[in-house]
Image (tube, rainbow, N blue to C red):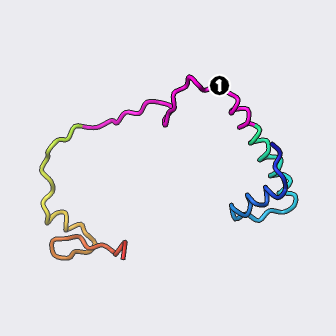
Amino acid sequence: MKLSKEQVLHIARLSKLGLTEDEVEKMSEQLSNILENFEILNKVDTDNVPPTAQPNALTNVLKEDIVKPSLPQDEVLANAPQRDGDYIKVKVVLE
């Protein structure tokens, strides 16, 4: 599939790219080659291939929860750069 100059310029506008005339010609050729490769892929018979979201099986690796005593509150607050009573004071993230 050969892309026209207008199509390349349209894609450039959507991508907010300013292209020179030489770049338009180069992109036209390169994008056309990419589309030709996808046309070849469209011809592949995938009727017996099940749809997948991930090509390899994923498994979660979880560590067993072990209950341990935590640090004393005074010790934790002693390391805080700013403190507001029993809390660590931080800069506002969302207003």
Instruction: Write the start and end of the magenta stretch as one range.
Output: 37-63
Q: Quadrant of the C terminus?
A: bottom left
Q: Which residue does the image show at 81% across and 49% down from the upper left?
A: 3
**Does residue 68 appear to the left or right of 36 in the view shown?**
left
| Residue 33 screen position, x and y as percent | 79, 41
Q: Is residue 69 above or below residue 88?
A: above
Q: Which residue does the image show at 28% across and 72% down from the upper left?
A: 81
Disc 1 marks which residue?
45
Which image quadrant for residue 16?
bottom right
Q: Secondary structure at mark 1?
A: loop
**Does residue 91 appear to the left or right of 24 in the view shown?**
left
Residue 47 on the magenta segment: yes
Q: Which residue does the image show at 22% across and 74% down from the upper left?
A: 83
**Does residue 68 appear to the left or right of 11 in the view shown?**
left
Q: Which residue is nearer to you in this view: 80 or 93?
A: 93
Amino acid identity at mark 1: Asp
- Look at the magenta stretch and give its main secondary structure: loop
Toward the top, the furthest residue is 48
| Residue 42 screen position, x and y as percent | 69, 33
Toward the front, the furthest residue is 47
Could you classify mark 1 by the number of other residues whose Cα lies within 10 Å: few (under 14), some (14-19), or many (20 or more)?
A: few
Which image quadrant for residue 72?
bottom left
Count of labels shown? 1
